[in-house]
Image (spheres, coloured by chain):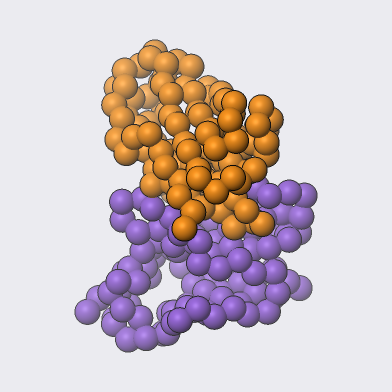
Amino acid sequence: KNEVEQSPQNLTAQEGEFITINCSYSVGISALHWLQQHPGGGIVSLFMLSSGKKKHGRLIATINIQEKHSSLHITASHPRDSAVYICAVQETSGSRLTFGEGTQLTVNP
Amino acid sequence: DVKVTQSSRYLVKRTGEKVFLECVQDMDHENMFWYRQDPGLGLRLIYFSYDVKMKEKGDIPEGYSVSREKKERFSLILESASTNQTSMYLCASSFWGTQYFGPGTRLTVL
């Protein structure tokens, strides 16, 4: 069993829909990261959070430490949001990350 | 803005060749990482370094070595490339936990 599980693996939505991507983990962590990877490979960090909720534009990330679960929400989705979204956990012992397999999101116009 | 650059976007090598992948960051970060990314497996850590001349094995170090002679530069070396090392290789540096990724090198070993 992977230490970090994401769901769904693939998600197709219509423009404007509200999107949720889920991440569950099984280890103790100091922080959880959400990353975005566009076609061509470049990865950018969206959020790093250790408790509660963070918001940036149309993106919202939440984490429940007790349940070892995080969600990434996208409001009013747009075709430019199409990308792979990756959840990663930073274990309490250091700076290295353990990654989920990613969620491929496609938003159709 | 933090900038992480990798020496090549695409690379084609032959089995048995020695391959060098270079990564340079311009923000004086202490931590640097090498990952490979394969379909269905996600990102996997090969090696990381937390200071000059310091290195730690990641989850899949076999067949790879690394070098960090200067703080800004972290090199990944494939001593004798094999076809199962065909992959996307990504370098990252980090500051206070946030990782900054390079654009990736897609390596094909024939």
At which x and y percent is residue A10?
39, 65
Total tally of numbered discs in the picture: 0
At which x and y percent is residue B107?
35, 32
Whether residue B40 is visible to the viewer of this picture, yes or no, is yes
Task: Give the answer, above or below, for where A32 lies relative to A78.
Answer: above
Relative horizontal placement of residue A66, taking residue B42 as reference (left or right): right
Q: Residue at point 73% right, 61% down?
A: A30
Task: Give the answer, above or below, for where B63 lies relative to A14.
Answer: above
Relative horizontal placement of residue B60, taking residue A105 as reference (left or right): right
Q: Nearer the viewer, residue B71 or A20?
A: B71
Q: Nearer the viewer, residue A38 or A19?
A: A38
At which x and y percent is residue B5?
42, 42
| Outermost residue, left side | A109
Q: Nearer the viewer, residue A80 or B8?
A: B8
| Outermost residue, top side | B16
Chain B tint in image:
orange
User: Residue A13: which quarter of the image?
Assistant: bottom left
User: Residue B60: which quarter of the image?
Assistant: top right
Q: Residue at point 66% right, 27% down?
A: B53
Task: Give the answer, above or below, for where A65 lies relative to A31.
Answer: below
Q: Residue at point 56% right, 53% down?
A: B99
Relative horizontal placement of residue A80, taking residue A57 as reference (left or right): left
Whether residue A5 is visible to the viewer of this picture, yes or no, is no
Q: Residue at point 63% right, 80% down?
A: A53
At which x and y percent is residue A19?
43, 79
Relative horizontal placement of residue A77, taking residue B22 as reference (left or right): left
Quadrant assignment for the C terminus of chain B: top left
Q: Which chain is purple?
A: A
